[in-house]
Image (cartoon, rainbow, N blue to C red):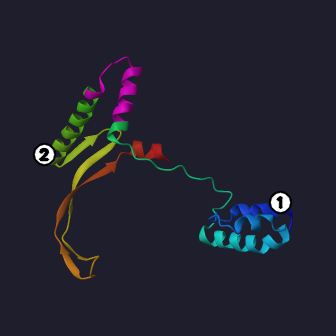
Amino acid sequence: MSKKKETKAVEAAPAAKATPAAPAAKAAPAAKAAPAAKAAAKAAAKATPAAPAAAPAAPKATTLTKRDLINAVADKAAAAGVTLSKTQLTQLVSELFEAIKGEVIASQKYQQPRFGTFEVRERKARTGRSPKGGAEIQIPASKSVGLKVSKLLKDSLN
């Protein structure tokens, strides 16, 4: 085994706790350390499967929080020459969501052009299983809010 390949195998192995015997192992000739390095590399390969080299890593998805939304609105407002305090923007965003919630409750639907439609959806009663014991349970009928995304927004994602 060449030194280059041996170095890669040692780098791939997980770090072990330092023991008094570890310095002696480092001083051992490369030929004696090679079987241990191969075994450690195999164990590491089994524990974490390697991703295909051709596929690029996908960016980590993040969630837009209310604070992030307020900061984004503040930046857009500042760029447009409008100055509002963070307190005013926080109140504005809260009132906006309260207005949408009130409309959905009152009329069962709220439509925002070029974004989508929030609407109340009814779920039928059904039989389910308890995750704890596996016994059958009755799940009552309920209402939920769904979002039907507009065609314009859907097309902009693709």
Q: Which residues are magenta?
A: 69-87
Residue type beneath disc 1: Lys
Image spot of residue 87 (x, y percent): 26, 28
Residue drawn at (28%, 46%) of the image: 117
Whole-angstrom CA distance, mark 2 to mark 1, is 70 Å
Image spot of residue 141 (x, y percent): 16, 67
Residue type beneath disc 2: Ala
Q: Quadrant of residue 44?
A: bottom right
Task: Assess disc 2: are there few (<14), some (14-19) or many (≥20) residues with their C-alpha within 10 Å of its C-alpha.
Answer: few
Q: Which mark is residue 4?
A: 1
- Which residue is at the front of the view, 70 or 96? 70
- Which residue is at the front of the view, 85 or 104? 85
Q: Is residue 50 magenta?
A: no
Q: Which mark is residue 106?
A: 2
Q: Quadrant of residue 69?
A: top left
1 on left or right of 9: right
